[in-house]
Image (tube, rainbow, N blue to C red):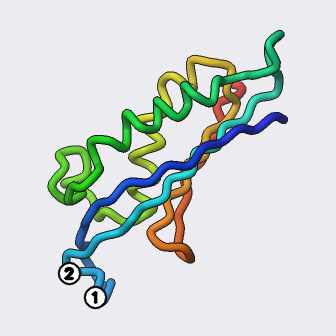
Amino acid sequence: MFEIGIAEEFEAAHALEGDFGPATRLHGHTYRVEVRVEARDIDETGVFYDLGRLRADLRAVLDPLHYRNLNDLAALSETNTTAEVVARYIFKQMEPPLRASKVASLKVTVWESPSSFASYRETFEDE
């Protein structure tokens, strides 16, 4: 299996609901987002998905989140904006072009700090 990946960052704020202690107050993160895709084969040029295209795909998803309160975004307003939820949201935004290509799986990892992260992953094969 071949794998490629990229990482980007964005700045955003949020406040969690529930038993999250101080995280229930509005606070911010420098989110680090890692995207990894896998495929069984590469093409005649030696790739299965262009890294530049993958980076552009991710930037298109992250730019509207940059310097925003995640709780105010329509797509996230009905959720608890945990790292897990943000990872799934980014995944769902990135999924369509990747599913349409020869990509076998997509994994999105969202880091809220250097020591805390959550990931969301799906495999597209055999669908």
Asked if residue 82 lies left or right of residue 126, the reply is left
Q: Residue at left 62%, top 18%?
A: 101
**Quarter of the view holding residue 36:** top right
Q: Which mark is residue 14?
A: none
**Quarter of the view holding residue 43:** top right
Where is 99 relative to 10, above or below?
A: above
Q: How many marks?
A: 2
**Quarter of the view holding residue 104:** top right
Q: Gap between marks 2 and 1, in whole Å? A: 6 Å
Label 2 crowding class (10 Å Cα cut-off): few <14, some 14-19, many 20+? few
Q: Which mark is residue 25?
A: 2
Q: Check the picture and name the quadrant holding the C terminus.
A: top right
Asked if residue 112 lies left or right of residue 73, the reply is right
Tags 2 and 1 touching, CB below 8 Å: yes
Task: Give amino acid for label 2.
Answer: Arg
Q: Residue at left 49%, top 49%?
A: 8
Looking at the picture, how far across and down is residue 46, in whole percent? 82, 19
Looking at the picture, how far across and down is residue 10, in whole percent? 37, 54
Looking at the picture, how far across and down is residue 113, in whole percent? 48, 73
Q: Residue at left 27%, top 58%?
A: 79
Q: Looking at this view, is 112 or 84 the one in front? A: 112
Label 1 crowding class (10 Å Cα cut-off): few <14, some 14-19, many 20+? few
Q: Residue at left 71%, top 38%?
A: 4
Q: Check the picture and name the quadrant holding the N terminus.
A: top right
Where is 12 relative to 42, above or below?
A: below
Where is 78 relative to 89, above or below?
A: below
Where is 22 relative to 84, above or below?
A: below
- Which residue was labeled with disc 1? 22
Q: Looking at this view, is 47 or 18 the one in front? A: 47
**Element carrying mark 1:** helix
